[in-house]
């Protein structure tokens, strides 16, 4: 299963480092080659000799080891693997990764790598639950780092709770899962996201409150299932996900052009909050206050991207998914919108201020399709995205 795969295994300094010796053995049994890297602190828990004996390879320990630089520079070392595994991922290592620090070999490799990274956290329960660790964890997830564990249970320090490193065989299973093709492998999917900005003059624009959080989460979830994602985004608050093709736009017209350039696709998910109108009289000079009174803005209708793509006669994506932000009669309005736009599914949500959904981290959606309305319980936007990605995979692969 793992034959011909090369794993760069970074062992952090925690008591769970002893389990990494078994991890090396299990990986080698399955045919993987393991290049081990030890942090200074890790050497307090396991010896370089035992690690290298089990791995059957040289152990890398020091950034400034010139022999290593002559043999293989740290950049090359960081990229020579198919997967980087950090086990145990200590609070310190996670903090360095989230903060972008590179002051030793392990953290430098993690900054320099362009290979997927899988972390197996291990630390005391209080350290795991500390807001700083939780912040780092969220940041790393947003950066595309994958995680296995931590598990809950008795800890070496005598406490109980989440923080135990996953068992070697669980880590192996997660490593194998990273290499198995997801259900959307080979599918090309377009996602629009974020607001659009419609200029009034060179310094002013009309915008809306979309943060881009839901569209970004959908793009990330689709990529995690193996899809090739083209992510066309307006100026969003959240950063675009890793491992997707990002096309940054500002106006609805630019978004429409970028969508055309992305075709053909197997599916299109239109999560952007596109401005319905633009200022047709936008000035190329800054508007000045005038004695003649207030400026009058003339509007023109923007292209309805979703409607246009859903009505394509040639090359229409197999699945077209729209979003509907409503404030009342959600099902009724969204059902009518689905018919009007001609899309296959509408993901509708209630964005009345009382729900806290617009700009918040949670969403409560109703997916309207030919089969009717499917109400999902309120959950995190990431969870909504994962569930939607699985539903899309089901529709594209049936
Ligand atoms: N949409 C689009 N292009 C536009 C406007 C909207 O692609 N110019 C897409 C959005 O990405 C979303 C869906 O259409 O998937 C819903 O948009 P919305 O603006 O809410 O629908 P409208 O038809 O404008 O209806 P209303 O404003 O009356 O709610």
Image (cartoon, rainbow, N blue to C red):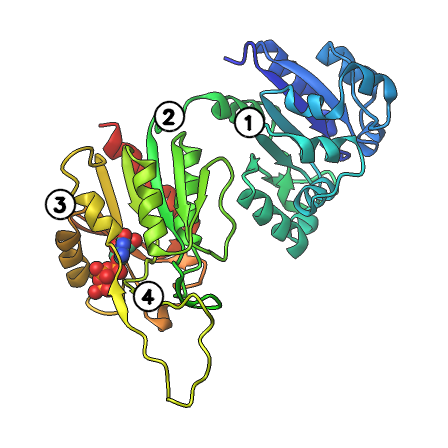
Above/below status of 14 relative to 350: above
Is residue 149 found left or right of 317 in the rendered image? right
Residue at image location 19% in from the left, 58% down from the top: 334
Q: Pointer 2: residues within 10 angstroms few (<14), some, or many (20+)?
A: some
Q: Pointer 1: residues within 10 angstroms few (<14), some, or many (20+)?
A: some
Is the residue marked 3 within 8 Å of ligand 1, measured from its CB?
no
Is residue 318 found left or right of 248 in the rendered image? left
Q: Is residue 19 visible?
A: no
Mark 1 vs 4, N-terminal side: 1
Disc assigned to residue 351: 4
Which is in the foreground here, disc 2 or disc 1? 2
Mark 2 vs 1, N-terminal side: 1
Which residue position holds label 2? 185
Dots 2, 1 in contact, CB < 8 A = no
Is residue 349 found left or right of 203 in the rendered image? left
Which residue position holds label 3? 370
Above/below status of 265 relative to 101: above
State the SS at label 4.
loop
Mark 3 vs 4, N-terminal side: 4
Quarter location, residue 319: top left
Residue at image location 44% in from the left, 34% down from the top: 224
Residue 237 lies, in percent from the top left, at 50, 58
Residue 343 lies, in percent from the top left, at 19, 46
| Residue situated in front as seen by the camera: 68 or 274 | 274
As measured in the structure, the alpha-carbon distance from the residue carrying label 3 to the one carrying label 2 is 26 Å
State the SS at label 3.
loop
Q: Where does ligand 1 appear, by image quarter? A: bottom left
Which is in the foreground here, disc 1 or disc 4? 4
As measured in the structure, the alpha-carbon distance from the residue carrying label 3 to the one carrying label 1 is 40 Å
Mark 2 vs 4, N-terminal side: 2
Which residue position holds label 1? 170
């Amino acid at each position: 299963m793992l034959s011909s795969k090369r794993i760069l295994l970074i062992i952090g300094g925690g008591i769970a480092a002893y389990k990494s010796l078994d991890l090396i053995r299990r990986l080698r049994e399955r045919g993987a080659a393991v290049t081990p890297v030890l942090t200074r602190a890790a050497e307090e828990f396991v010896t370089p000799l035992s690690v290298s004996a089990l791995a059957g390879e040289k152990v890398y320990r020091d950034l400034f080891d010139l022999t290593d630089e002559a043999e293989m520079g740290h950049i090359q070392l960081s990229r020579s693997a198919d997967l980087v595994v950090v086990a145990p991922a200590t609070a310190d290592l996670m903090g360095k990764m989230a903060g972008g620090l590179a002051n030793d070999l392990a953290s430098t490799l993690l900054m320099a790598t362009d290979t997927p990274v899988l972390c197996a956290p291990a630390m005391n329960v209080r350290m795991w639950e500390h807001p700083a660790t939780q912040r780092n964890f969220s940041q790393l997830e947003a950066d595309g780092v994958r995680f296995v564990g931590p598990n809950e249970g008795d800890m070496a320090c005598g406490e109980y709770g989440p923080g135990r490193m996953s068992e070697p065989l669980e880590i192996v299973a997660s490593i194998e899962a990273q290499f198995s093709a997801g259900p959307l492998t080979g599918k090309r999917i377009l996602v629009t996201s974020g607001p659009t900005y419609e200029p009034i003059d060179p310094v002013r624009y009309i915008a809306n409150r979309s943060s881009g959080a839901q569209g970004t989460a959908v793009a990330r979830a689709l990529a995690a299932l193996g899809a090739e994602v083209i992510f066309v985004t307006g100026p969003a608050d959240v950063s675009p996900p890793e491992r997707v093709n990002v096309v940054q736009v500002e106006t609805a017209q630019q978004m429409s052009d970028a969508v055309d350039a992305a075709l053909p696709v197997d599916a299109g998910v239109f999560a952007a909050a596109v401005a319905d109108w633009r200022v047709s009289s936008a000035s190329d000079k800054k508007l000045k206050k005038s004695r003649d009174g207030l400026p009058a803005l003339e509007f023109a209708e923007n292209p309805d991207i979703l409607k246009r793509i859903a009505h394509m006669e040639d090359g229409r994506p197999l699945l077209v998914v729209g979003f509907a932000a409503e404030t009342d009669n959600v099902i009724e309005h969204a059902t009518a919108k689905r018919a009007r736009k001609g899309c296959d599914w509408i993901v509708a949500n209630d964005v009345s201020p009382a729900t806290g959904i617009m700009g918040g981290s949670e969403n409560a959606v109703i997916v309207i399709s030919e089969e009717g309305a499917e109400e999902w319980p309120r959950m995190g936007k990431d969870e909504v995205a994962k569930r939607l990605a699985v539903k899309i995979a089901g529709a594209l692969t049936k």
